[in-house]
Amino acid sequence: MNVELNVQPLDGGFAGVPTYLRNLIAALETRHPSVALHFAADHVVEELPRDRQTLVSPPIRDLKGKLLWENLRYPLHTLASRPDIVHIPYHATTCWGGGRRVITIHDCFLWDHPPTARSERVDLWLLGQAARRAHLIITDSLFSANMIERLFRIDRDRIHVTPLACAPDIVVERPSAEVDVFRARYGIGARSIFYAGGTAAHKNVAALVKAYGLLEPDLRATTNLVIAGRVGNDAPHHLAIHAAIADLAGPGRVILTGLLPQEELGTAYQSASLFAFPSLYEGFGLAPLEAMACSLPVIVSDRASIPEVVGDAGIIVNPLDHTALAAAFTRVLGDPAREQAMRQASRARAATFTWNRTADLTVDAYRAALSR
């Protein structure tokens, strides 16, 4: 089976998609050698074998260039290369071309929060057309599959749920000295509540600060709230985080680390007492999975796909109920036996999500696309 992967997201600043793509490629190469992988993008990807890459020009410069590349240059290339499968591992606008088109749609957030600019609305309409015309769609969760089926009126047998896993380097055990250095760098105490996963409005980060403020003073005095991610002074949801911090009274400390590099994330998880994730919308929820893989107790939102990922290993609460969040923090931080049991449950749950499984399900999707 000849498969061409559109590797445009690699080196292209596509947020979490490169993690998915890198680990999928690695698992496909080792687990399914009969699948011949070839790669195409508008730039050379240094981390991939050069002899299996095709440079499709001109390079993308802006939204207009993106639409031209995805709707003309890339489809013309696939007509010439004629692979069995063309896998576009992000939601692109490509509606035609050679081979059976398999598109990965990680979530439907844009349809729940549509853009206002005319050019972005055109892009959104084309994304919908690409979804409807794909031979098969891969998505990360049952929640997203249900959304895709309803939004695009696509037969369910054209949608394959293929859960993700976390990057292997996240779960490497860090020496205690490395954890101590990380804590010292940011002034983090021995006990902390940790959050990572972006600071966009739907991430609901201000709710964490408000819930932290509801902890009993003695507990808050010995527990930091650590928020990883950019919290600027330019957006309403960022200003809401700052306002919630300013409203805190009494003991305790909120620490804003800024964006953490990938190599520090595993250390950050390992340094914490629990992980809190009050997001209102996730196509999958990779951050809670990473936390569980690092044996952290997790307290998460009851929205979207997040309960699918966490299962019964964590505490699931209404993310808009600050009192419920605070009560969940107390249940874990105030009970060492519960904390230890949740750490074990987290590790066991995370172990069921592997990139080998993702690769196997992806190949199943390729075979289903070829049979259509």
Image (tube, rainbow, N blue to C red):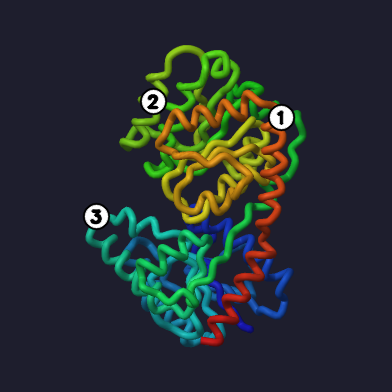
Pointers 1 and 2 in contact (CB under 8 A)? no
Residue 221, image quadrant:
top right
Q: Position of residue 162 (x, y in %)?
A: 57, 65
Q: Earlier in the sequence, mark 3 or mark 2?
A: 3
| Residue tagged 3 | 116
Of badges 1 and 2, the one in the foreground is: 1
Q: Which residue occupies 42% across, 27% down?
A: 210
Of badges 3 and 2, the one in the foreground is: 2
Alpha-carbon span between mark 1 and mark 2: 31 Å
- 57 versus 214 height, above or below: below
Q: Position of residue 58 (x, y in %)?
A: 41, 71
| Residue tagged 2 | 244
- 33 versus 10 height, above or below: below
Q: Secondary structure at mark 1?
A: helix
Q: Which residue occupies 52% across, 60% down?
A: 141
Please tell me which residue lies in front, 284 or 49.
284
Q: Secondary structure at mark 3?
A: loop
Q: Position of residue 346 (x, y in %)?
A: 67, 44
Please tell me which residue lies in front, 180 or 162.
162
Rate crowding at label 3 as few (under 14), some (14 to 19) or many (20 or more) other CA atoms within 10 Å.
few
Q: Examine the rendering and report whether any part of residue 317 can be seen.
A: yes
Residue 340, image quadrant:
top right
| Residue tagged 1 | 337
